[in-house]
Amino acid sequence: MANLNPENPPNGRIVIEDELTIYTVLDLKDKLLTALSTTEELELDLSDVGEFDGAGLQLLVMVKQEAAASGKALRLTGHSPVVLELLDLSGLAGFFGDPLLFVRPSASL
Amino acid sequence: MEEALLIVEQAADDPEIINAIFRAAHTIKGSAGMFGIDPIVVFTHAAESVLDRVRGGSVAMSAELAALFIEVHDHLRDLINRVAEVSQADPEADSYGRRLIAQLETYLGESQQAENADAADSADMPVVHQSSVEREHSDMVGSDHWHISLRFGPDVFRSGMDPFSFVRCLSSLGRIVQLVSLTGGI
């Protein structure tokens, strides 16, 4: 269940495939932290993420904190709909600080 | 729950028994919410609200109310069985359920359309302290403001749960005005 597509090491970009959930976080944690250690800036492309839960969110937070602690940058890009939804629900979009656009259906007053 | 209800018919004022029934209803509602079974959540919420008033003393337990709760219990069991058997919706049972909810609401001292949508829209949850609110007599229930703090132990994921399923359950009961995730523990 490899969820990693290391196109990268030079420019530190990883595409996360499909599942970013409790089932994959253990595996991903090691790979992401290793990748972070080899670059100054790591980009995580989330456009393929089809499943994303609290555990996956927690992993992203952890990697973000690791990056900050070691003076590196972490950028999340290509947020898929499930990623956007949970980032919005959790109120953590600002924490990550990546440019995002949330489109909400207009509510009737 | 049934045991407690049968006892309460005789020992109408025992607070421990009322508490036991309340806790049972609350647990059922919580579990149903976790699994997204909204009809059970709505139904138990009405029962729970009345039980809460009984606990608080603003509504007196009576033989009549106890009998209503026996009906409530039976209907709840029916709802749960239907979910377990993945039965098709039963309009007769649903209208019976709505009738029970209406009866329960007479104890809450307000008339309210027992529409699921209205119940879901009625409670706001901004980050302010809870105040006890006198309910207005209107089509919409007067807003209750709740500040809910969820703190999860380190084993929550290991136990097979996701904190956000709790959040989603809450959002089926009311409207989340603001949610702040604290990441310090990660």
Image (cartoon, coloured by chain):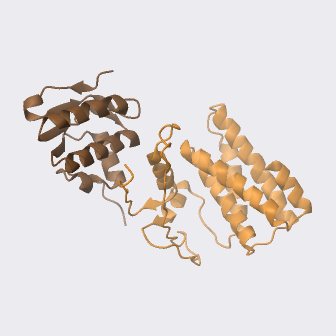
Chain colours: A brown, B orange
The residue sitting at 70% across, 37% down in the picture is B81
Which residue is at the far right?
B10
- Is residue B178 shown to the viewer in this render? yes
Of residues A24 and B71, the one nearer the viewer is A24
* Left or right: B65 as drawn, with respect to B161: right
* Left or right: A89 as drawn, with respect to B80: left
Of residues A78 and B139, the one nearer the viewer is A78
The residue sitting at 45% across, 60% down in the picture is B175
The residue sitting at 60% across, 66% down in the picture is B112
Percent x, y for residue B49? Answer: 66, 64
Query: In the displayed structure, would residue B1 be above or below residue B145?
Result: above
Which residue is at the far top?
A1
Query: In the displayed structure, would residue B92 be above or below residue B22?
Result: above
Of residues A50 and B93, the one nearer the viewer is A50
Q: How many marks?
A: 0
Query: In the displayed structure, would residue B186 be above or below residue A51?
Result: below
Percent x, y for residue B185? Answer: 39, 52
Of residues A102 and B89, the one nearer the viewer is A102
- Is residue A103 shown to the viewer in this render? no
Percent x, y for residue A78? Answer: 19, 39
The residue sitting at 63% across, 51% down in the picture is B29
Percent x, y for residue A29? Answer: 31, 34
